[in-house]
Image: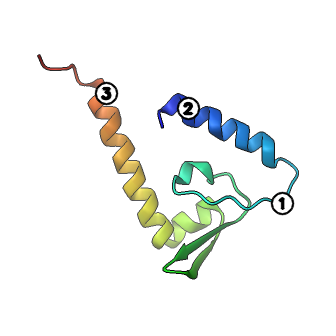
Amino acid sequence: VDTETELRIRAALDQLVEGRTSIVIAHRLSTIQRADRIIVMHKGKLREIGTHQELLAMRGIYWKLYQLQYKEQEIESREELQPQQL
């Protein structure tokens, strides 16, 4: 999904869950960063619970996933900025 589409999806999701208890299953961490509580599952077991900031501070599974996704986005951004070679 491109950046513009992702922003649209997040805005729609924010509107949909506003004022409701909701369960959102996501692979992209940007989708859940603003959640009140994030539950990290790994191999069928609950591993971590907290807010985005709390989970990053733990430097556990969530932090590792965040680092992987951030680096991936950083690489994609750099590739977009480089002039195309002919």
- Horizontal and vertical percent for residue 36? 74, 60
Residue shown at 41%/65% (left/top)?
64
Secondary structure of the residue carrying numbered label 3: helix
Q: CA distance from mark 2 to mark 3?
A: 17 Å
Q: Is residue 79 above or below residue 67?
A: above
Q: Which mark is residue 5?
A: 2
- Left/right of residue 54 with respect to residue 1 in the rendered view: right
Which three-letter amino acid code belongs to the residue tagged 2?
Thr
Q: On the picture, is 56 further left or further right than 65?
A: right
Please, which residue is most extreme toward the top here? 86
In terms of secondary structure, where does tag 1 sit? loop
**Which amino acid type is shown beneath numbered disc 1?**
Thr
2 or 3: mark nearer the eye: 2
Q: Which residue is mark 1?
A: 21
Identify the residue at horizontal 23%, vertical 24% (top origin): 82
For badge 3, the amino acid type reads Glu
Q: Residues within 10 Å of mark 3 (few under 14, many from 20)?
A: few
Image quadrant of residue 46? bottom right
Q: Residue at x 47, y 33 (%)?
A: 2
